[in-house]
Image (cartoon, rainbow, N blue to C red):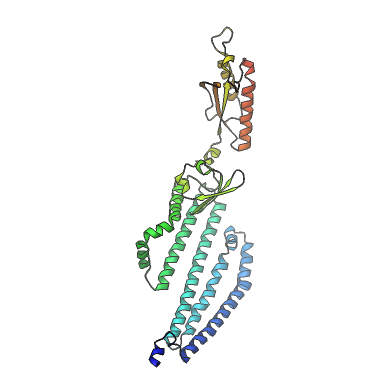
Amino acid sequence: MTDLVSYSLIGWITDRNLKIIFGSLIIIILITAVAIGVDFLIRKTLLSYVNHSLAKSRYLFLRLFVEYHVLNSAALLIFGLVFVFGSFLLVDNNNPLSLSIATVVLKSANLFNLYILTLSINRIIFALHDYYQQVSKRDDKSTWHSYIKIFSFFTWLLVTILAIAYIFGQSPTTILTGLGALSAIVLLIFRDTFLGIVASIQANASSMVRVGDWITIDKLDIDGVIEDISINIVRIRNSDNTISTTPTHNLTSYTVKNWEYMFNSGGRKFKQIIFISTESIKFNESTTDTNLGSYRKHINEYLKNNQALNHEFKYQIILKGVTSFGVELEISAFTKATSGIKHEEVKAQITAYSLASLAQFQLKPAKAEN
C-alpha cells in the first residue's frame, strides 16, 4: 500500500514539500509587494518629474518620448528585474521542487522583461517616425508609415519565436524548422498578413498609394482618402464621411485610381458632351463654312482665353459624329482648380456658356425625343 501511494499522484506531497510550496508562495507575495512598491515609487517620484520636464522641453523629440510613453513602459523593466533577482530566494538547498518553482518565476520574469523591452523599442521607433513626419520636408514621409508597421510586425514575430524557444528550452532554429514543416497551415492562417506585407512593400516601392492620397476602387465601391495603411487593413474615409476598410492586398489585386497625382499636377480634366440638333446645322452666308464650324472656333477661342483653365495641358473640341440624339460634340479641358467644388464651378460655367452660345450661331440642342 505504501508503494502504491508513493507512486500515485499525491505521493510526492510530503511535509517538506508542503513547507517549500507555502514558503515559496509567501516569498512570491513579498516579491510582488516589493516590485509594486518600487514601481509605484519610481512612477510617482522620478518618472513623474522626468516626464513633466520632458513634456516642456523645447526639443520635439523629447516631447514625443512623453507622448508615446516610452519611459513609462521602460520603467516596467525594473518591476520584472525585482522578480528576476527575487527568484533566487526561492531556491532551498537545491531541492528539486524549489528549483522548479524558482525556474518558473525566473522564466516568467524574463518573458515579461522581453515583452516590455520589445514594447519600448517599438514605441521608440514610432516616436522617431513621428519626429521624422513632423520635421522632414521630403515627400516620402507617408511611405515610411507602412515600413514601420512591417518592422513592428517582424519584431513581434521574432520575439514570439524567441519566447517559445526559451519556454521549451529549444534553439530558435529548431522552432523555425518546426514552423517550416507546418508551412501550409501557417500560410493558411496568416494568408492575409503575408499578402498584406507583400502589397505594402510593392505599394511603397512604386509610390502607388500613400497615407493622405485620394483613391478610387470601383469594384469595391471605395472613393475617399487613405487614413491608415497597416499590414492587414487599409482604412479609407469616403467622400460621404463614412469609413471603408479593405485588406491591404486589394491595393495590388484591383485597379486603383490615385487622384493625388492629379492634385499635384495643377490640372484636373473635365469632359462635357453636347448634342446638337442636325436640323439646325447649315452653311453660313457667303462662306463655305457651317454654323457648327463657326461655333467650334468660337468655343475654342473662349477656352483659349479662359483664365480658369491650365493651358499647359491640351484642350479639345471634338466632333464625335452623328448619333440618334444628334451631332455629338465633346468639350474637354483642364481646370487649374483641382478640388471638387471649384472644379465643378468652372466646368458648370463653361458648359453653361457653351449651351448659351448655340443660339448665337442658330444652333439648337438636340431634343430628348430625337
Q: Is residue 64 above or below residue 210?
A: below
Residue at 46% in and 63% down: 156
- Residue 337 in the image: x percent, y percent? 60, 35
Side (left or right) of 70 relative to 360: left
The tally of labels here is 0
Side (left or right) of 111 relative to 33: left
The one nearer the camera, 168 or 183, is 183
Q: Is residue 70 above or below residue 97?
A: above
Q: Is residue 147 above or below residue 348?
A: below
The one nearer the camera, 365 or 362, is 365
Residue 96: image quadrant is bottom left
- Residue 135 in the image: x percent, y percent? 56, 52
Q: From this viewpoint, which residue is outermost toward the top?
A: 286
Side (left or right) of 89 relative to 4: right
Q: From this viewpoint, which residue is outermost toward the front?
A: 1
Residue 173: image quadrant is bottom left
- Residue 339 in the image: x percent, y percent? 60, 38
Query: Quarter of the image containing the C terminus?
Result: top right
Residue at 46% in and 81% down: 102
Residue at 50% in and 45% down: 209
Query: Quarter of the image containing the N terminus?
Result: bottom left
